Amino acid sequence: MMGASGSSEQGRDEQQNSAQCGPADPNFRFLMGKVKNLGPAAQRIFDLGKLYLTPDDAEKVQKDKTDFEHLFPAADESHLSAEKEKEAFQLFRPLKKSTAIHQGQTYVQWKVGYEYQSAYLLCLHKRNIIYIQPIDDFPDFVRDFRFQRGMIRVGLFELIQGFAQIYFSGLDVMVLPGIQLENQGWEIASRYHQVTGKKQYLVNDFFPRLQQILPSNGVCILGFVWTDLFPENYNFVLGEASPKHKSGIFSFGRFPPSQFDADHTQDLTEITGDVVWKLLKVVSHEACHLFGLNHCEYFHCAMNESGSVGEAMSQPLFLCPVCLRKLHQVCGFQVLERYQEMLSFLKDIQDQLPCESTASAIKWLEECLTFLQSK
Ligand SMILES: [Zn+2]
Ligand SMILES: [Zn+2]
């Protein structure tokens, strides 16, 4: 994608002077697109794409304060702008810059690919619904799980729906009635894993099948199954998505074989905060792939590539400015309202299903909202 203009950008890189970095800078435009006509909160956060374009400062700040928890202890009205810059570095920590920007997927590169891919579908139907599709049976403790959301009690799939409804604000999210594989007549390859002894389904076989049942107003479909999953040539996967098929498939009930110990590892018996975190992490990351987002090479970000489940779970739940810019283009959400709603949602989760990861995501959101709302 973008081979020709990619090489012309290389020329721009050579002329890059970090002192002039900002919305008028061609590298910034290539990374973030035009941000000038967006709302104030959107502009403020997308402007932070420039943190990646000032690698020297980034390294310096990262060395001093690798953990933003040590930063400004509380919201202080009187931040200086230099302080503010440092604060922003703690919200979005640039990855060490080892490649030219066009070797990652900039906003401009993403936009060309995404618009090309979705033009055909958009012509046919107005597609604005993310569908959630439960597949086969789930254990009683999953089926009976209830979460208090405001005045109502909802099940696990409605909890995921509520989260996705905020993460992908601007689109709708709906849960479809459950289906049984045997009634569908889907042929899904399976095997028994040699370490865990558990049955596993091959993820790739789900994608074309899910695509077939994607309703005409659906932008993508996310299948959930209790049985373990494996991708071709790998051991185990929590979830995977195929942008070509507008579908993803997820399984969350088990431990990866690398953590499996036949004497001590037991199947999950309750929905805990860690299980919910795992689900929200994998669903948001994979669904972003369905909107054409590649792995992020610019910042610590929800779209970073991961080599293991443990690594994936420790990565941020939220997108960096570059990736958020892409999702914002797809969904058209209000940046500030989306973060506010997410904060209230995660606080509900933390009240009922506490875990450390959710606690740090809440802290991040509070810092981010303070940054966005400060003068
Ligand atoms: Zn990925
Ligand atoms: Zn990113």
Image (spheres, helix red, strand yellow):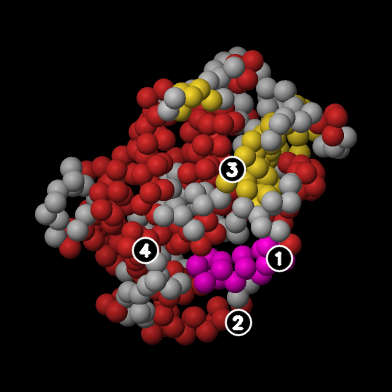
The disc at residue 173 is 3
Q: Nearer the viewer, residue 370 or 276?
A: 370
Residues at marks 1 and 4, CA–CA distance in whole angstroms = 28 Å
Q: Is residue 114 magenta?
A: yes
Q: Position of residue 152 (x, y in %)?
A: 48, 24
The residue range painted magenta reads 103-122
Instruction: Count residues near mark 4 (Cα–Cα under 10 Å), then give few for <14, some for 14-19, many for 20+.
Output: few
Rendered-image quadrant of the N terminus: bottom right
Q: Earlier in the sequence, mark 1 or mark 4?
A: 4
The secondary element bearing badge 1 is classed as helix
- On the question of residue 145 being in view, the answer is yes
Left or right, residue 159 beside residue 299: right
* Front label number (2 vs 4): 4
Instruction: Return the residue at label 2.
Output: 4
Which residue is disc 1 drawn over?
Answer: 123
Q: For the residues labelled 1 and 4, say whether their Cβ atoms are less than 8 Å apart.
A: no
Q: Decide: marks 3, 4 in contact (CB < 8 A)? A: no
Residue 10 x %, y % = 49, 81
User: Which label number is shown at residue 39?
Assistant: 4
| For marks 1 and 3 on the same chain, the one whose residue lies earlier in the sequence | 1
